[in-house]
Image (cartoon, rainbow, N blue to C red):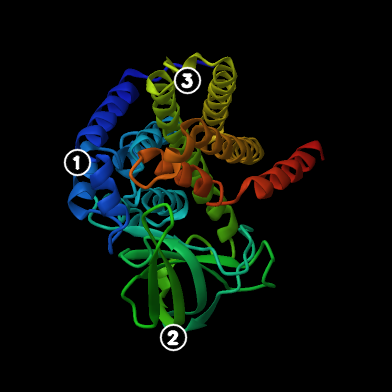
């Protein structure tokens, strides 16, 4: 396997890293992340102009990338700056559109790429426990379309999105793999209720209620009752994105911790000269490289067969969950009490690393899933 990025990807990474460094500084980021909107529309448009959103999609779908390594490059750069703009929603909704959308539905990807539409995946429910097949929201046929009723939880940027991709059950029991359908729902449709709130690591989420929401027949994305496979594709891309974002955040935590060890003095010498701290830092560097290897493996498998893809993604999420928490804990401990302060960027990177573990399935969930997929492979 070639571990070197192509020239185009290196240029994209350099451009994004420079933009984030110059335009998305720590104070700017916190003002956006903990504000009432949870994103900056002007910066979102600039990201779109730089091609950061377009890199997430293939040329056939109106982008210029779309491979696993393109997603990894973009989200690693975002992780370095703790960017909270709605890239993840654009990626997951766009991948679903690209996978099974009609020509008219696929045309919506252009609005995602240019930043004019903010999209959100409304799938998780209060009792879903990360299981993609557990959907209680119902969709019933009505005159000219469908009627949706139910509730969704922790929808990223759900309170300010223009477009919602909603999973709803058209048949089967609440945890059946069959009978799940996907619907494109305008966020301002009658009957859609949204209650937004801030996340502890910055950005916004929303609880969304669907009270007999009427949508047309053309709102159905893909075949009726066959939405689970599409969800796997969309969420799989999101898992890779989160893992790459975590690697970017780890790199910054590592850099800042090394700098602190080299400059903080006790007994007249830099604490980085203490052997115990050197050993802990060396172990941390090795773990971060293992995280990067897991992301590379997942990126390479993204467009492969289902079992290979899903096992690689779950393996990466398990690795990131464990090592992300380790990096957060060790970096703060080596900083001492100052590592927990709001004013120091490290505390925000630590929070983000911990919270990434709980997005799209935590370490325990993906470990169990990895083992279950292994049994499928053996059959």
Q: Where is residue 265 in the image (x, y as percent from the top left)?
A: 41, 21
Which of the two labelled residues, at mark 1 and mark 3, occupies the earlier sequence position? Answer: 1
Which of the two labelled residues, at mark 2 and mark 1, occupies the earlier sequence position? Answer: 1
Tell me the residue at 52%/46% (across/down).
354
Q: Disc 3 versus disc 2: distance between alpha carbons? A: 72 Å
Q: Disc 1 versus disc 3: distance between alpha carbons? A: 44 Å
- Relative depth, front residue between 253 and 146: 253
Count all numbered tags in the image, as a single digit. Answer: 3
Nearest to viewer (mark 1 / mark 3)? 3
In this figure, which residue is indicated by the disc labeled 1? 49
- Relative depth, front residue between 16 and 166: 16
Q: Would you say residue 303 is visible in this rendering?
A: no
The single residue placed furthest to the front in the displayed view is 267
Image position of 93 with respect to 263: above or below: below
Secondary structure beneath label 1 = helix
Tell me the residue at 37%/19% (across/down).
6
| Residues at circles 1 and 3 in contact by the CB criterion of under 8 Å | no
In this figure, which residue is indicated by the disc labeled 3? 271
Q: Where is residue 124 in the image (x, y as percent from the top left)?
A: 54, 63
In this figure, which residue is indicated by the disc labeled 2? 143
Which of the two labelled residues, at mark 3 and mark 2, occupies the earlier sequence position? Answer: 2
């Amino acid at each position: 396997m070639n571990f070197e990025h192509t020239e185009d990807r290196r240029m994209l990474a350099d451009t994004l890293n420079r933009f984030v460094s110059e335009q998305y500084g720590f104070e700017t980021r916190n003002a956006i992340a903990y504000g009432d909107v949870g994103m900056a529309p002007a910066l979102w448009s600039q990201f779109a102009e730089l091609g950061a959103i377009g890199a997430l999609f293939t040329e056939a779908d109106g982008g210029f990338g779309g491979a696993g390594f393109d997603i990894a490059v973009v989200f690693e750069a975002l992780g370095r700056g703790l960017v909270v703009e709605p890239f993840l929603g654009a990626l997951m909704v766009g991948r679903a559109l690209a996978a099974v959308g009609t020509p008219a539905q696929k045309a919506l990807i252009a609005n995602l790429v240019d930043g004019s539409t903010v999209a959100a995946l409304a799938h998780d429910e209060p009792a879903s426990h990360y299981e993609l097949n557990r959907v209680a929201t119902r969709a019933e046929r009505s005159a000219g379309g469908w009627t949706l009723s139910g509730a969704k939880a922790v929808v990223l940027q759900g309170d300010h999105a223009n477009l919602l991709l909603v999973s709803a059950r058209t048949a089967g029991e609440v945890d059946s793999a069959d009978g799940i359908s996907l619907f494109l729902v305008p966020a301002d449709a009658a009957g859609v209720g949204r209650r937004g709130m801030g996340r502890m690591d910055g950005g916004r989420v929303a609880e969304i209620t669907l009270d007999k929401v009427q949508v047309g027949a053309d709102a159905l994305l893909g075949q009726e009752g066959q939405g689970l496979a599409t969800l796997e594709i969309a969420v799989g891309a999101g898992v890779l994105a989160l893992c790459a974002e975590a690697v970017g955040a780890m790199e910054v935590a590592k850099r800042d911790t090394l700098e602190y060890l080299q400059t903080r003095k006790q007994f007249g010498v830099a604490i980085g000269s203490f052997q115990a701290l050197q050993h802990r830092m060396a172990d941390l560097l090795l773990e971060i490289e293992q995280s990067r290897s897991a992301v590379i493996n997942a990126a390479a498998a993204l467009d492969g067969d289902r079992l290979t893809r899903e096992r690689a993604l779950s393996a990466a999420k398990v690795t990131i969950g464990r090592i992300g928490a380790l990096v957060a804990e060790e970096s703060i401990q080596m900083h001492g009490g100052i590592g927990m302060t709001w004013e120091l960027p490290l505390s925000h990177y630590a929070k983000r690393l911990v919270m990434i573990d709980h997005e799209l399935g935590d370490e325990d969930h993906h470990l169990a899933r990895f083992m279950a997929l292994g049994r499928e492979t053996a059959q």
